[in-house]
Amino acid sequence: MLENYVPIILFMSLALGLAVLLLVLGRALGPHKPSQAKSSPYECGFEAFEDARMKFDVRFYLVAILFILFDLEIAFLFPWAVVMDEIGTFGIVSMLIFLGVLVVGFIYEWKKGALEWE
Amino acid sequence: MDSILSLWAWLPIWLQSVIIDLLLIVAIMVPLILGVAYMTYAERKVIAFMHVRMGPNRVGWRGLLQPIADTLKLIFKEIIFPKNSNSYLFLIAPMLSLGPAFAAWAVIPFTDQLVLTNIDASLLYVLALSSVGVYGIIIAGWASNSKYAFISAMRSGAQMISYEIAMGFALVGVLMAAGSLNLKEIALAQEGGIHQWFFLPLFPLFIVYFVSGVAETNRLPFDVAEGESEIVAGFHVEYSGTAFALFFLAEYANMILIAALTVILFLGGWMAPFPIIPFTLIPPIAWFLIKVCGVLFFFLWFRASFPRYRYDQIMRLGWKVFIPVTIVWIVVIAVAKLTPLGFIFS
């Protein structure tokens, strides 16, 4: 079975090879005349005011945390969904209870305002 | 000829299969790159006609050589390195975008015979690779050390992971109906005509999946990551020349990938809509390509029709509309499976 994954590795390396080839081509065939103005970060034509790596809204961080939770739920649901027809009523009902718990958490975060952007 | 054949026979078996694989991969990648090139041409033409303009019509007959001219132009442009950037990350980011966008094609079944490698976890593999794509964007925005790029990277990172959840839940619905993670098996589960295709019983999931796909690829109307009128070009504002071309290739390859997946998961893959004679005369691969082109047309149509969403509206749509809809539909399928009505969803 594992030899089925060999073409995938080959495909990935070929795709990366294409990327490297294009970059090398661009470097070899394009001009290369860096200057102070050209290589300064783009900002409306002014000198950049400060470093771009500034403090950022914590809500993006919150979204990332919620994403991990929900993605984990999906990872649990995947194998369940595949064998759905074999596990019978018990399997389906227990997963529905699990989904119920998830939904309670979802309603909680909704009410808490974790999904608000204004 | 004989000497080539004897040389071929002399090679070890594993090397032979590697060479055959490489040739097959090239046979997928070259049409894909051409598809991307002509997708840009189709996009410009279709949108031009929707705006009652001509679109590109100078290079070649009706502008048909325009994408080739564009490629050549990009190759001969300078790749500029911004002075405060992290140069390694700056170069790795476009590769990280392009790699997964192309590598996902390794498991796409074009017909029931025509698939490079038929692995059982192919849907999982595609989902995993599409998650890797977000790293390219985040790293590009970080490495550029430009404010526009940084804002865009944050925005599109949050947007892509939000819609990935809705997408994942929609896929769970498909798995429940098909009972397999193998893309080929999923398509085969829809055999027997248009009434068997999953877009009918799973209609809400079909809509959620496709709209999430549009959001995942940062296309209009969800393109706040690139928003020309506010943050110029977003995460690739500092990229030029072929480094920019890599992002471009990745975005369009992802678009075609989403279209192909929509066709395989919901629109019956390579199957004809009616299993009777005038329809079955068209070869399966042609059906597949026709359907993919049809889905791709919607991407262009959306771009010409809808104004850009505001960022809070995008997040609200993803979290407060799509995720509840998909959870409800998963429960509906699960409950239906417990009753005699389960046949609707299989």
Image: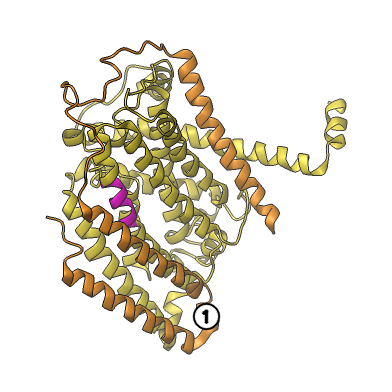
Chain colours: A orange, B yellow
Find residue B319 and report its horizontal and vertical position in percent.
25, 62
User: At 25% from the left edge and 53% from the top edge, which residue is drawn?
Assistant: A60
Horizontal side of residue B124 vs B198, given as left or right: right
Q: Is residue B191 above or below residue B213?
A: below
Q: Is residue B37 above or below residue B113?
A: above
Q: Is residue B202 above or below residue A93?
A: above
Q: Which residues are magenta?
A: B155-163
Callout 1: few (<14), some (14-19), or many (20+) C-alpha neighbours within 10 Å?
some
Find residue A64 and report its horizontal and vertical position in percent.
31, 57
Along the line of sight, the residue nearer the viewer: B210 or B136 = B136
Find residue A57 and report its horizontal and vertical position in percent.
20, 50
Total numbered circles: 1
Horizontal side of residue B329 vs B28, given as left or right: left
Check the residue under mark 1 and report the chain it is in.
Answer: A
Residue picked out by circle 1: A85
Find residue A12 and report its horizontal and vertical position in percent.
56, 42
User: At 45% from the left edge and 80% from the top edge, which residue is drawn?
Assistant: B343
Which quarter of the rendering shows the N terminus of chain B?
Answer: top right
* Rendering quarter of residue B241: top left
Per the image, label 1 sits on a secondary structure element best described as helix
Amino acid, disc 1: Asp
